Every structure is written in C-alpha cells, then in structure tokens.
Amino acid sequence: MEEVIEVTKLLLKCGADIKEINAVRKHISKVKGGRLAKEAYPAKIVSLIISDVIGDPIDSIASGPTAPDLTTFHDAYRVLLKYELWNKVPESIRRRIQMGLQGKVPETPKPGDPIFYKVLNLIVASNLKALQAMANKAIQLKLNPIILTSQLEGEARYVGKAFASIVKEAVSSGNPVKPPAAIIAGGETTVKVSGKGIGGRNQEFALGVALTIKNLRGIAVAAMGSDGIDGVTNAAGAIVDGETIKIANKMNIDPYAYLKDNDSYNFFKAVGKSLIITGLTGTNVNDLIVGVILKQ
C-alpha cells in the first residue's frame, strides 16, 4: 500500500492527468480496473458511484473497480516513461509492470468479459449535478447563472486567466451572460510543480484569476475542491476579487514570485481573507468554480 501511495504522489506532482494516473493505478492494484468485479463474480453487483472524474467515465472513477478497463500494462509503462518516473517508482512497482508486459501477470478485465453482465453501475452524484445546484442557488440570489462547463482542464494558472477573461467580457459586453450574474464551471485542472512552495490547483487557478481582474470592481471569483482539500494544504481553495493584487502590492508582496514558486497558499495566507477552509467534506465531485458579477 505504501508503494502505491508513493506512486500516486509522484504522478500527481508531475502533472499527469487523471486518465494517465488511473492507467498506472489499475495495473498495480488487486481491485481497480474491474478486478473487484472479477473477484465478486458470479455475484450480482450494484455500484452506486460518486464521480470525481471529468465526463463521468465509469472506468476511471475510483479507477473503475467494477468496470471494464480500456488500458493495458503497456499504457501504464508509457505513462511512467513519459513523466520520467520509471526509475523513481519503487522497485516492486517496476517489477509488477514488467511481469505484466511479459504476460506473467493477467491483464485487467476488458469490455465483453462475462463478469460484467452481473454488474450495474449507477452515478448518483457528479460535478455537473453540483454545478446545477449552484445555478439554482444563484437564481434564488437573483443572479443570472450560466454553466460554462463541467469538464474544465489544463494548467491551473492559465485556465484561471482564461476564466477571468470570460468574467471581464461579461462585465464589458454582457456576454455570455448579463450582470448581475454567476459564471459557473467545474472540472479538474493540473499543476506542473517546478517550485518549492505549497499550494493546490484551485489556489493557483485563483491567483491566475486575481492577476487578470486586478482593480476591477464588483467581481469575485472562488475556486475550491469539493472534498475540502486543495493540494497538500488545509485549504479547499481561494476567493479573489479586484482588490486582491492591490492589497498584495501595498504589502510589497510579489504575486508573480509566489506563482513561479508554486506557493499560492502562502501568498493568500499573507494577503489574508482569501483562503477557503471548510475542512474535509467527506465527498468529492471535482472542483467547483464561480465568478459573481454585481450589476455595474
């Protein structure tokens, strides 16, 4: 188990996406990648699923313990090579994957395997369902909601800047929604860690937003992990507005230096009143983002 946790940490830190991470995890586990269904066969299985994967692919959620696997040992091997992790993962992990490549360890169950005839997979909660609930709440608050996407991906700081540009467009032209408004999105961005700071994808996203909406009034953007955890911090994410960078500048805090060092947590901690701290929520449907625009 410790070796598996170590591999997961390495994959998260290198910027691998969830599909790549799952390709590896499925092939170093006894239950993921459909293996739980295989162990339970011929019993009938009803799997109630909370989705924390973009697009809700059954085979990727929790690494698909009751779903057929489309990936192979070769895919897992290629992911570790791609991110130069092959020589960094524990020797036991390399040995298992090598045995799989040689056919000495059985592949994960694939589509068409009879074991899945006895399986019913049902998604009971997802990012899109959460975004729809957010939109309903926005209506109650007399805001015009728009859900951009539940499949937001990409490098967090740059996606944050792109999201901020949509907020700015709504302010200046009323597109894609007229203020007062709530621009809503969800998904899961990534961070390629090159610095020595601490933070998470939502905090880095928020810092990218803050730099883009500097000095704008009547705007606030929040980005948070629905599980209450962002990266390796105690924060779920961060909330920013047009004053965030202005306050930092007055305190002689350089946001670009913090961003370069992947130190968004300490940036927001220093600025104050920005970190979102909820504690563990006990569930996970990916990240939740909302930009609120007051009537100008």
Image (cartoon, rainbow, N blue to C red):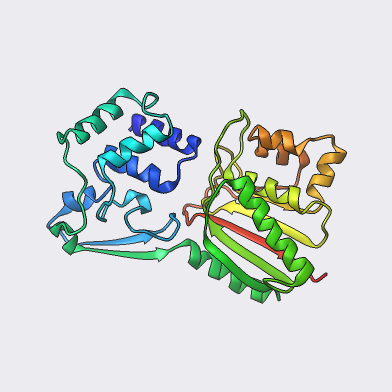
**Residue sitting at the far right:** 250
Residue 3 position in % (x across, y down):
35, 29
Residue 247 position in % (x across, y down):
83, 44
Residue sitting at x 80%, y 35%: 253
Residue 282 position in % (x across, y down):
47, 52
Above or below, 54 against 182 in this view is: above
Q: Nearer the viewer, residue 205 or 66?
A: 205
Give the quadrant of residue 287. Answer: bottom right
Residue sitting at x 44%, y 32%: 10
Residue 99 left/right relative to 160? left
Residue 60 position in % (x across, y down):
35, 52
Q: Nearer the viewer, residue 258 or 236?
A: 258
Residue sitting at x 37%, y 32%: 81
Above or below, 13 against 120 in this view is: above
User: Can residue 31 be seen in the rendering of this structure?
Assistant: yes
Residue 12 left/right relative to 106? right
Residue 129 left/right relative to 123? right
Q: Nearer the viewer, residue 18 or 139?
A: 18
Above or below, 207 against 68 in this view is: above
Quadrant showing the N terminus: top left
User: Can residue 277 be seen in the rendering of this structure?
Assistant: no
